[in-house]
Image (cartoon, helix red, strand yellow):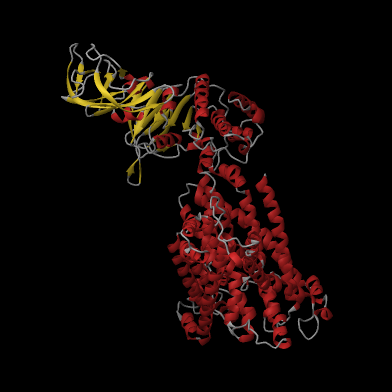
Amino acid sequence: MTSMIERPAEVAAPAPARSRARRLPASAGQALVWFAVVALVVGPFFPLVYSSLRSKPIYLPGGTFTLAAYRTLFADPLFWTAVRNTVSFALGTTVLAVIGGTALAIVCARTNLPGRKAYRLLLIAPIVIPPLGLIVGWLSIYGQGGYLTQVVSKNVHLPVWNLSSIPGMSLLGAVITIPVVYLTVQAALAGTDSWMEDAARSAGAGPWRVITRVTLPMLRQAIVNCTLLIFALCLEILGIPLFLGAPSNIDFYASYLYRSWSSGANPDPAFVSAGAVLLLVVVSGLLLLRARLSGSEQRFIAAGARGGGTYRPLDLGRWRWPASIGLGAYIGITCVIPLLGLVLMSGVKALTTLEAPWHLFTAENWRLVATDPTLRRSITNSLLIAGGGGAATVLLVAAATLIAHRSGFGLRRILAPALIYPRAVPGVILGIGFFWTYLMFTPGALVRNNLWGELIALCVRNLTLAYVVIYPSLARINAEFDRAARSSGAGWWTIARRILLPILRPALLAAFVLMFITLLGDYDPVVFLQKPGTEVLGVTMLQTWQRGVVGPVAALAVVQVGIVAIVLLLGTRILGRLRRA
Amino acid sequence: MSFSDTRVLDDISFTVKDKEFVTLLGPSGCGKTTTLMCIAGFQTPDQGRIACGDDTFVDRDARVDLPAERRNLGIVFQSYAIWPHMTVAQNVAFPLRVRRMSKPAIRARVTEVLALVELSALADRYPHQLSGGQQQRVALARAIASSPAVLLLDEPFSNLDAKLRERARDWLKALQHTLGLTTIFVTHDQDEALSMSDRILVMNGGRILREGTPEEVYRQPRVRFVAEFLGQCNFLTGAIGTGPDGGEVLRTAEFSDGIKVQGRHDGPTGTIAVRPEDIEISSGIRPGAPGMGTEASVLHASYLGDHYHYQVAVGALQLSVHSQRPLAPGPVWLRIPPGVATFVE
């Protein structure tokens, strides 16, 4: 193809002088970001796998390659018990969560339930409530020594539930994971018109039949998607077994690893690394299957709000108000009452039915939180990590997302899977991996014993959240915006800075809020990294609880929930203003 | 060049002269936008060379591929691509800021360009506060702000309604003429192509089928696709013979006297193209009158405001005919004057 265009002899206006400072090619900066992301995401695995294959811990001289760690693991009957417990728990939780979440999504999105607009927001609440806050709240009300449990068994003399059993833990697990199912199914529903359902209704089908014969089959892919995700999440869960499993001596996989790590005769035994590697392989396999079944990047586009889905609500008839009240009761029982219990527990000496709570009021727990150096440090450290780490992560992920989807960088296709992967990896495994990384590589000494090590581990674990918020917004920006800027003479970094990032501002803010909330409450990766002086909220709560001191834990949880609520409120307000501008 | 297995552009070659307005015309998927994107630098051809004056943009043999941001072209995209977070003035100033012009110079140039496109009053508005036509002018202003060597437009009027499109057409042509800007315009709309261009390149299937001025391309399409794409056309196939004055005539069963055809053609048979508006149609003529033409019957008639459209049957043929006057009911007579028919392949 040949074409020649002759330059105009005279120009309409004087051509402006072009003095561009000599600068590095865009790909230099892109390579830097690429390398940072890939190193952070993939790095920890090599020391993890390596340490599982060594006969001696890495910091001791000598040692050979051996599979002894794996053999020790398989020989331990406690390991197999933990595996059985975990699988039963995962099955129970998944079934409950998928059924519950799907039902809730359909009811709130496709029927004329009264108050459904409010419920749509409320049902997402468990995602933003710090998980430990929810767990401690449940314990305070529904646990074996919980307030309501005592009321029912001692005062009313009815047979009572046992929260510290596997069914009980599955229930709590379902409550925590239902919002994930709800969001996924709701997004799938939002993207479709209801014409198929309308067609069924005009043929005479009642609402129940419409839902079972038309809506559910349409949602099949979303449901399979969630099922695999929830199951994988359940395999790695740490908080529930540590807090609830202790009285019944029930260990899950992650709590088994944690206990072996922290209380073993030999510190940091290799078989814990071996267990971590195994879990990693299983979870990765599940998520690979999920990606294969549902098309990996599509699910992130569906996660954004999509206009254009119109529907006529299904009429619930005389079930309208009972269903609405039932939903309200569900939210009350699963979220509101436990949170109230949390607040109550933070202000009393002990939560018991033997005496009315108001006789037991005490400010001792709060005094401790305000004065005890460890507790205070936990709060400030967590705030630092959440704020500083959150901001830094959002920026890094924003740059990486832009490179992955809007640049010509040669290796960009590796970035998107790399950004998704950390969330897929169980948090405890990432923690162990980072522990070994800091030990094995000399730069690790800089971060090993201070807050930076924990910050890096927590931020890497959660950077997927930022990606999942930023990518759909980026995908909605017309690619011709980039081209128009290029034809105006702008290089890649100028386009990123002046065009794409400003347009992405609402998404960046939303990503920061989500990161902040999550970093504040996350503790999985850090249980293996915390040292005196580098305490964070979640781990301090865990360790305080394990010592049997209950009140301050509730107080800390209230602090956590309070900070999250404030940040959420501020964030939504600012976002609303940004969107209106 | 190819996308997967499809050859999107196949041996495209053309030259645009200084200050010329050239249109790439063709249906969707013909490769016209791809050609434009290759010139702009957003796609790279597998083979060949693109140059602008002394600057070579692409030369596959010499491994030259100048990035889009260094080609100094102005582009108006189909979606306008006005950045929503910047005002009109900021949008237009962007190419100048990237070139590190001084602030006073930028301000002066932006004012000048906005006056050219008649948007001076809207300089501080945001894109969502503008109408479609206004957004399009912002896109144009941004494209010409940096005084590009060439202006490229990718179906810029396709999002405007019909009346606005006509006004925009005239306005753009006047602007281009005033500025003396070399322009390459891509469209699938034949009216735009015919009314604005100095030269048209009709494309289909990744190839250029016909090149010429609007009159040449319309009157002598030479290729059947081009004849059909630009306006309506009737095609008649028959035997070729020599007429009384030495020119070629086409004889068919219905027109046994022969239709005088422009140009020459090799071979005993051929196909000619005749435009509906060139066929003379009349009614109510006394049978036997000299020169009245071939008898036909009207199958269908419709009124389009500025002309009548008749679908007539002549023997086994069906022809489209346009007429300024209504016809009386009954048989009609067709006459194809000499010189209006041309050969097509």
- For the question of whether residue B155 can be seen, the reply is yes
- Occupied quadrant, residue B118: top right
Question: Residue drawn 63% across and 73% down?
Answer: A527
Q: Is residue A406 above or below residue B318?
A: below
> Percent from the top left, x then y, of residue A185?
53, 62
Q: Is residue B79 above or below residue A532?
A: above
> Percent from the top left, x then y, of residue B126?
64, 37
Quadrant, the N terminus of chain A: top left
- For the question of whether residue A542 can be seen, the reply is no
> Percent from the top left, x then y, of residue B312?
29, 26
Given residues A430 and A443, the one toward you in this image is A430
Looking at the rendered structure, the number of numbered marks drawn on it comes to 0
- Occupied quadrant, residue A541: bottom right
Q: Left or right of A168: which side holds B194?
A: left
Q: Left or right of A64: which side holds A391?
A: right
> Percent from the top left, x then y, of residue A266?
58, 83
Quadrant, the C terminus of chain A: top right
Question: Residue drawn 70% across and 88% down?
Answer: A157
Given residues A177 and A368, the one toward you in this image is A177
Given residues A261 and B1, the one toward you in this image is B1
Given residues A473 and B235, the one toward you in this image is B235
- Occupied quadrant, residue B281: top left
Q: Left or right of A401: which side holds A513?
A: right
Q: Left or right of B333: which side holds B175?
A: right
